[in-house]
Structure formats: structure tokens, C-alpha cells
Image (cartoon, grey):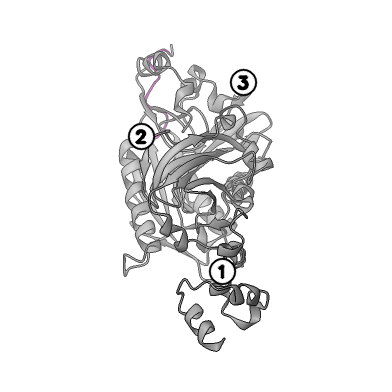
Amino acid sequence: MAAVAMRCARGLAFRATKLLTSTQTPTYYGAQTFRRFSRTVTALDSVKKFTKDHEWITMDGTTGTIGITYQAQDKLGEIVYVELPEVGAEMSQGDECGAVESVKAVGDLFCPVSGECIEVNTALEEDASLINSSPYEDGWILKMKLSKPEELDDLMDEEAYQAFVRTEDS
Amino acid sequence: MNRVLYVRNLGRISYSEGLRAQEKLQRQHLDDLAGKTKEPARDTLLLCEHQPVYTTGYRKGQLPSSEEDRLTKLGAEFHRTNRGGLITYHGPGQLVVYPVLNLAHFRKSIKWYICQLEKSVIRACQSFGIQAQMSPDTGVWVGDRKICAIGVHGSRFITTHGFALNCNPDMTWFRHIVPCGIVGKGVTSLSMELGRNVKIQDAIPTMVASFAEQFDCSEIRHENQDVPTGRKSEGDARCSTSA
């Protein structure tokens, strides 16, 4: 088990039934490796990943749904307008892909990953404040077909994002 | 925390020059964030005065091009920008302030930042003996007359655009628009409220001090000696339809 644990710690994609049951003892392995296995094991969960620009992305196959976080909408205030990206546009990770306007202020949106924009949330054209009231559900902004799924590994998971927010606010 | 506020008086410049000055500073801040520079970027207050210009905000679709034609025929420039807010006017006699800051040095919240800008202006007005306040409509108000308009942009919490405080502009320019899209409310200036001529040069020291105090800056560093803000800053550019 120690040898297996060592291989996990080096991030190798090692899957074994014995190891799966071991994921119930998180203190045994490094947290990062544990989470990778959690994602493999619980593939049906829509795991959220986060960027330092306060955006979130959840995956369904190779399609990602993207929005801004609760903290982002809280820092912006009441949102009055959203500039949605163009459906069909090819974007790279870090590109500006739209903007969010709160009362008297516009904030840029950045692409968390590369790919093609396949759908935008047109409900926001009628009611941009959905982002405030429901940032993770009704206030989603765009869907993308990812061209480089490995970029998801660059992003933070929920725990890391919450820690990041705490350091920003301190 | 030792916060240094740099102040640069650009004098009377075109709106485009103002945009370029902001973009250059913004680029320095973004490069600093990305670790591309050795020299840390400076949180800077750009002060200036523009020739008559009407500007709209990010929601470009809302103002038809016929409106743009109407306004330029009055003798003003017209610019569509990426700031928040709707249509406003800038011109001689109005102190325009563009704080290009990294909000990470202050507080990473655009909502907080807008509120701080309003409070800075209220502080400055108070120094002049004017009771100004905030309202549900953004900006700084004296009663139901707006004395200062606000509209900003944030990219990774680097701020551009800012606010415009009416010192002694020719107020007739405002008659041709619904300022900030707020129907039924008026506009005013420091001069109108005080019944005496208050020039931009008179307002600058108070405005800078109020800003530094509100944003808790420990030091103010002027990047240039006092540059006169134009030959005349008494609303000399007359709106072409005023009698």
C-alpha cells in the first residue's frame, strides 16, 4: 500500500479497487492526489473549478458551463448588463470573453479555458441580475466545448478557491 | 499599510489623450500583476480637463447614431467607451479625475470602490461648505442636482475611467442629454452652489487631499509641477446653440 501511495503522490493515474476504498481515509494521502481520485471515482458529480478572476466552470463531458462566483457578484454589486460572448467564437484561456456591468462599473470576463463558445445564457439579456440572485444556476453565462481539457488542472477546486478569497479579503 | 498615491496633472487634453494615458498606466499594472515588470506599477490619480465631449458607456446599443450626429453638430466630440454608466458630458470647467489603481492595494471590490469615490467627492464638497450626498442613483448629489458623475471600468481590479466634478462648466451643454439616463433630475456645479466662481485650479488641491484621505493613502507624490489647466478654464467653449 505504501508503494501505491507513493505512485499516487507522484500523480500517476493509478486505479485499483483496493485504492478506491482507501480514498475514504483522506489523511493517508496528499490532498491533491485524493481529489484527483475523488473525481475519477465520483465522475457523476459536477465538480466546480475556479479561477483567480472569480469565475467557475463545471463540466459535462467536454462541455463546460461558466459563470462568475458568489464573491464576484458580491464585489460588483447589482448587475445591470452582461456583454455575452459570440456563439461560435474560438477563445483561448485568459482571453477577454465579455463583460459584466454593475451600477456605474464594468468588469471584464476572462475565459477560464480554451475552446469554442457553443451557447450563451440569453435570459441575462432580459434580467442581468440573475447573476446576483443565482450565480451558480440561473445566472450561468456561457457554455464552451473545451479544446484543451487539461487546462482544467490549472484551476482551483472549491477549497483552494475559498482559501484564495480569504487571502484576498484579508 | 504604506499606500503612496501618485498624482499627475495632465492639464487640458483631448478625450483620446486621456484614454491613452489611462491605458498606458493600466498596462503597467497588468504587467505588474503578471510578473512581467521589475518596477512596481504606481497607483495614480490622473487629473485633466477636456474640450467639450459627450461619452457613452459600455451599453453601446442603447444610443442610436442619429443621437451621435445631433450631439456632434453642437460642436462637441463623441466617444463610446468601455466604462459603466450611460451618457455624460465633459468639458472646460469640469475637473475630470481618472484614478488608475490596483484595488489589491486597497480592497478588491468594485462596489466598495464606487462608494469610496462618492465619499471622496462628498468630503471635497464639504471642504467647500457644500452638503452633498449619495443617492440610489450613482454620483454625488446636492439635493436632486448632480454635481459629480461617476463611471468606471475594472479589469482584474485595475481601475480606469473615474469621475467628473463640475467646477464652473457652461451648464448649457448638459441640456442636450439626459445625464446618465436619469430623467427628471438636474445638474449643478461648485460655482452654482456657492454663488461664486470656483475654477478647476481651486478645486484640485482639495479633491486630491480628500481622495487620499478617503482611500487612506499615507503619502501623495506629485509627478509633475502644477500644470495650468488650459489658458482659460471658465467654460469658455460655448455650446453652439446657446444664445
- Residue B158 location in percent, x, y? 45, 53
Within 10 angstroms of label 2, few (less than 14), some, or many (20 or more) residues? few
State which chain disc 1 sits on. A
Q: Secondary structure at mark 3?
A: loop
Disc nearest the viewer among 2 and 1? 1
Residue receiving disc 3:
B183
Q: Main secondary structure of the magenta part?
A: loop
Left or right, residue A67 beside residue B100? right
Q: Which residue is mark 2?
A: B232
For mark 1, what is the residue?
A37
Residue A149, by quadrant, is bottom left
- The magenta segment is B230-241
Tell me the kind of residue under disc 2: Lys
Q: Amino acid at mark 3?
A: Val
Observer-nearest of A54 and B230: A54
* Residue A119 in the image, given as x and y percentages of width and height: 49, 35
Residue B163 is left or right of residue B133, and the answer is: left
Which of the marked residues, 2 or 3, is nearer the chain's N terminus? 3
- Assess disc 1: are there few (<14), some (14-19) or many (≥20) residues with their C-alpha within 10 Å of its C-alpha: some
Disc 2 is attached to a residue of which chain? B
Q: Position of residue B217 (x, y in %)?
A: 53, 63
Q: Could you tell me residue B19's position as x and y percent?
A: 35, 41
Task: Count the marks.
Answer: 3
State if disc 3 and disc 2 touch (CB < 8 Å): no
Q: Nearer the viewer, residue B176 or A136?
A: A136
Labels 1 and 3 share a subunit: no
Is disc 2 placed on a helix, strand or loop? loop
Residue A99 or residue A60, whichever sits in front: A60
The residues tagged by marks 2 and 1 sit, at their Cα atoms, a distance apart of: 71 Å
Identify which residue, B183 or A131, lies in the foreground.
Answer: A131
- Residue lying furthest bottom in this view? A2
